[in-house]
Amino acid sequence: MQPLYQITDLRHNQSGKYYLVWKQFDALAIFSSSTGAVFCEEMFVTFKIVFVYVTLGALAGIIGIPYSMMAGNIELLYRVVVRGIIPLGLRAGGIRVEVSGLENLPSGVSCILLANHVSNLDPPVLLPVLPGRCSVLLKKGLMRIPLLGTAMRMANFVPVGRGHQRDAARESVAAAEAALRSGLHVLFFAEGTRSEDGRLAGFKRGPFYMAMETGAPIVPIAISGTQTLMRKHSAVIRSGVAKVQVLRAMDPGQFESREELMLAVREKMIKALPEDMRPV
């Protein structure tokens, strides 16, 4: 009997190209296993989320971007997308978000929000639950996506280039400082990129430099669960629960250096994360 093959995952490489992952089975194994059914269910979850985001997102962009340009205000488009379309897509995919600690966000103060990063689901899970408007530091390539890139620029999202170019990093921090001074919260992902194994990785120094320069409080945020709902290098999304824990704000004025501030924030985040997400 000829061997049979089954698709087990959909992944993408560093250049952004997608490819299917195949696994060989014999006939008896594939028909007695539930792997195929699970994968089909996951692909259906992925399809539902993508369908909501593409159809409603495109409609919001086509109508909302010209309206926001004419009105000179992005607030309505931000609310429609972040408070409406993004949560709707998560619900369509069976993803439930559990939030705690929102009372730790200082009222009436622009803050530096600092979260760990384990999945591409982190931004859509986190942004809708945060009060007010947020500027987000994100990959520069996302700004080239039609409609989405335009909307993100209008919302004062800050593009960040990959690599170790110091001048580019300084420009990004300067843009984030401008967004902060305009009254927005600024959301950083502490490690700068997604963790390879789900555990908390090393922190970038930019947010702590900005906190010491501006005096803005840092609010640590611990995200868990998303690392199993959408794994790194995979485009498949699974249903389940994502947890967001907002921790007590930290005043940079109480620390003598950005290194001391960074260590204190990191320690607080480590304690809030599950054991299997803490650094070894």
Image (spheres, rainbow, N blue to C red):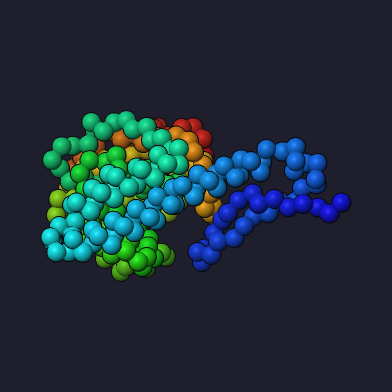
The x and y percentages for residue 129 are 29, 39
> Going 17% across and 64% down the picture, which residue do you hit?
69
Observer able to see residue 161: no
The x and y percentages for residue 21 are 64, 55
The x and y percentages for residue 75 are 18, 52
Left or right: 185, with 117 as reference point: left
Residue 244, compared with residue 186, is above or below; it is above
> Going 38% across and 55% down the picture, which residue do you hit?
55
The x and y percentages for residue 38 are 61, 40
> Going 49% across and 50% down the picture, which residue do you hit?
47
Residue 190, compared with residue 12, is above or below; it is above
Observer able to see residue 19: yes
Left or right: 223, with 172 as reference point: right
Q: Which quadrant holds residue 42? A: top right
> Going 35% across and 66% down the picture, which residue do you hit?
146
Query: Count of labels shown?
Result: 0
Q: Residue furthest right?
A: 1
Q: Nearer the viewer, residue 197 or 121?
A: 121
Residue 78, compared with residue 272, is above or below; it is below
